[in-house]
Amino acid sequence: MPAALAQRLRDEGLVAPDHDGRGLVNVAATVIDILGLHDASDPPPLADLEPELREGATGVVLIVADGLGWEQLRSLRARGELPFITSLMARAERGEGAQLLRATTIFPSTTTAAIS
């Protein structure tokens, strides 16, 4: 994406997709990598994943709330409407074997296109 366009999007409060380690495509690549199946042709794993969460992992539990944006998540949590996810977020905030990462996606954000 041209730098001027990316800056214009940021100025408007929009977030440009980040496919270099902070996008939905990198979530699948991370699971493949943790399971020891990552190939050089795959996208890179998530850039900000805490290394200790990978140590000794033999499986992965991935929770995807399709269509739930960051601000929606924060609002629902504040209203107490997501008790299970709130408990996971609290564990992540305390650094107790969980981590919450913000990921970007494509536009328009159709799930099939974003994770394939």
Image: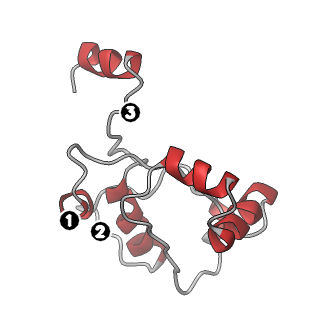
CA–CA distance between discs 1 and 2? 21 Å
Nearer to me, 72 or 46: 72
Q: Quadrant of residue 40?
A: bottom left
Residue under numbered circle 3: 15
Q: Which amino acid type is shown beneath numbered disc 3? A: Val
Nearer to me, 21 or 14: 14
> Callout 2: few (<14), some (14-19), or many (20+) C-alpha neighbours within 10 Å?
few
Residue under numbered circle 1: 112
Could you tell me which residue is drawn at 27 percent across and 63 percent down? 115
In percent of width and height, residue 2 lies at 21, 20
Q: Quadrant of residue 99?
A: bottom right
In percent of width and height, residue 80 lies at 69, 62
> Callout 3: few (<14), some (14-19), or many (20+) C-alpha neighbours within 10 Å?
some
Which of the marked residues, 2 or 3, is nearer the chain's N terminus? Answer: 3
Q: Which amino acid type is shown beneath numbered disc 1? A: Thr
Mark 3: which secondary structure?
Answer: loop
Could you tell me which residue is drawn at 76 percent across and 65 percent down? 91
In percent of width and height, residue 75 lies at 60, 49
CA–CA distance between discs 3 and 1? 20 Å
Could you tell me which residue is drawn at 31 percent across and 58 percent down? 25
Which of the marked residues, 3 or 1, is nearer the chain's N terminus? Answer: 3
Could you tell me which residue is drawn at 41 percent across and 62 percent down? 27
Image quadrant containing the N terminus: top left
Mark 2: which secondary structure?
Answer: loop
